[in-house]
Image: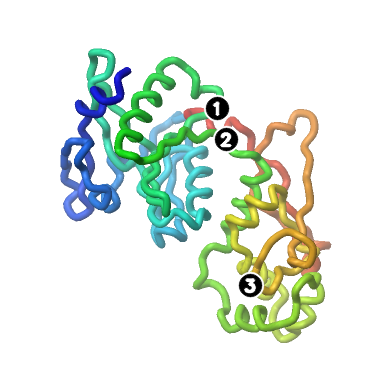
Amino acid sequence: MAAASISASTTVSYRCADTAAEEVQVWASVEPDVLRSAVPWRTFRWYKGQKHYSGTFWSATERDLVIYESRLELARLLFADFDTSVGRIVPQPFLLRAVVAGALRRHIPDYLLFTTSGPLVVDVKLRHRVDRPDNAFTFAWTRQVVESRGWRYEVWSEPPAVELQNVRFLAGYRRDWLFDHGLLAELRAADLDGATLEVTFRSFPKQPTAVVRCADVSRVHPHRAARRGQVPRTAHRSVGKKGKPGGRGSGLKFATTRSHGAGADRLPGRPQQSESSRGKAFRPGQATRTHSEYPSR
């Protein structure tokens, strides 16, 4: 496929935020800011017997709900929401039309991310389906079209299960308005670097243990903690003064979990806390979801 000829024949269709009216432009000349404010080209569908799970996710980046069409798209959305380089997330951003191999082709990417390194177009697909001829063909010409603008393009598949567990766990602390900002200021001012959570709780006897626990964990930068730690977090130690995860004296400890037998390929679910550990330590959630949650991607 000749990249120049494909790019020259490509048009992009998008929906305006104000009116949801369809606009069509030549791909080579469309302004990124126009697509930044686009609304989803299509919305998810619900019908009896569908094999995927669609929904909406409240994004800390967007400060609003963002749609996803599958559990795998939700996983990519979680990672984008915790990526500090991402400033805008546009789901189902536009429709590309291009003449490829003598026929008119159409494709709607899953996400358009506006990052500090420029626009990033994302397609989400199960790893074992990426190389199927029809998918590989679509991704190949889409990549040529996107990269002809100097933008980046990625095909994203299942992430490491443990890393996903970290991101899912920390997602529970993304709503900053739910936390006591006065308590957060006291935690930052206190000399608790490297202290255990038990010591942290005793340092604030007038505050409920659950409130102190949540405020302490909320100070961890979620993206850095998940990416650098690579393992589920426990709370044998408090967050360091600057909220830096990992490493001696940083105040954050990780614990490795292992799966065996039939559950070895499972993805982790929501973190849980046992009755006996309440007020003492966090316990990562057990594996509860399997890769079958991604059947349609």
Residue occupying image coordinates x 42% and y 34%: 123
User: In the rendered image, which residue does mark 1 sit on?
Assistant: 127
In the rendered structure, find residue 192 and report the number of the disc placed on it.
none
- Discs 1, 2 touching: Cβ within 8 Å: yes
User: In the rendered image, which residue does mark 2 sit on?
Assistant: 158
Inspect the image, locate mark 2, and give the three-letter code of the amino acid beneath it.
Glu
- What secondary structure is marked by label 2? loop
Q: Position of residue 145 (x, y in %)?
A: 31, 31
Q: Earlier in the sequence, mark 2 or mark 3?
A: 2
**How far apart are the two marked residues, 1 and 2, measured between alpha carbons?**
7 Å
Would you call the spot at circle 3 few (<14 residues within 10 Å), some (14-19), or many (20 or more)?
many
Q: Position of residue 115 (x, y in %)?
A: 41, 52
Front residue of 223 and 54: 223
Q: Position of residue 213 (x, y in %)?
A: 69, 70
Kindly report which numbered mark, 1 or 3, lies closer to the viewer in this rendering.
1
Would you say 136 lies left or right of 35 here? right
Residue occupying image coordinates x 78% and y 52%: 255
Would you say 177 lies left or right of 192 here? left
In the rendered structure, find residue 215 and report the number of the disc placed on it.
3
Q: Residue furthest right?
A: 276
Would you call the spot at circle 1 few (<14 residues within 10 Å), some (14-19), or many (20 or more)?
some
Q: How many numbered discs, if any?
A: 3
- What secondary structure is marked by label 1? helix
- What secondary structure is marked by label 3? helix
